[in-house]
Each structure stands twice: as C-alpha cells, then as structure tokens.
Image (spheres, rainbow, N blue to C red):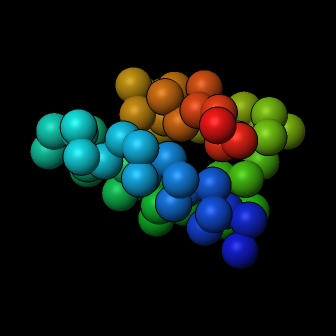
Amino acid sequence: MKETDLLLGRFADKHLQSFDSRQLALYEAILSENDPEILSWIAGREDLPAKHNNDVSKLLLKFKFYE
C-alpha cells in the first residue's frame, strides 16, 4: 500500500542509520508483515502482536510522521 510505504519510508529515513544489527532485524520482521496489518497497528485500530513487542515497534508507533 502506498500509505504504508510512505509512513515506513519516513521512519526509515529518520532511524535506520542509528539502528544496530538487532534493531535492523526487528525492523525487517515488521516489513515482512502485510501492509494493511502494519497500517492498522500504526493507526491504533489493532494491537501490536506480541511477536513484535520490542523497542523498534514501539519507536515506530510513537513516530510522528508529519514532522
């Protein structure tokens, strides 16, 4: 989905350069999920699955996409 790509792209632009290898792997795991599910987590329509309950996902959920 174009919306998810835009949101994740802005997040990546801001954070990926500071991620260590563990965090990059966690981010890659998020990217392996379906776009509608990711968008639902970001929008707060669905709870974040337990397997993605980590520092990278929490940073993504707190990220201000409009800044």
- x and y, in percent, of residue 6 in the image: 63, 63
Quadrant assignment, res 37: bottom right
Task: Spot the residue most to the left.
Answer: 21
* Residue 20 position (above or below residue 12): above
Q: Where is residue 43 in the image (x, y as percent from the top left)?
A: 79, 40
Residue at position x 36%, y 41% in the image: 15
Counting from the top left corner in percent of width and height, residue 4 is at 67, 62
Q: In which quarter of the image is the C terminus?
A: top right
- Most distant residue in the right direction: 45
The x, y position of residue 34, in whole percent, is: 62, 66
Q: Is residue 48 visible?
A: no
- Taking 7 as reference, is 18 above or below it? above
Looking at the image, which residue is at 85% across and 39% down?
45
Q: Can residue 65 be seen in this view?
A: yes
1 vs 20, left or right, is right
Q: 8 or 31, which lies in front?
A: 8
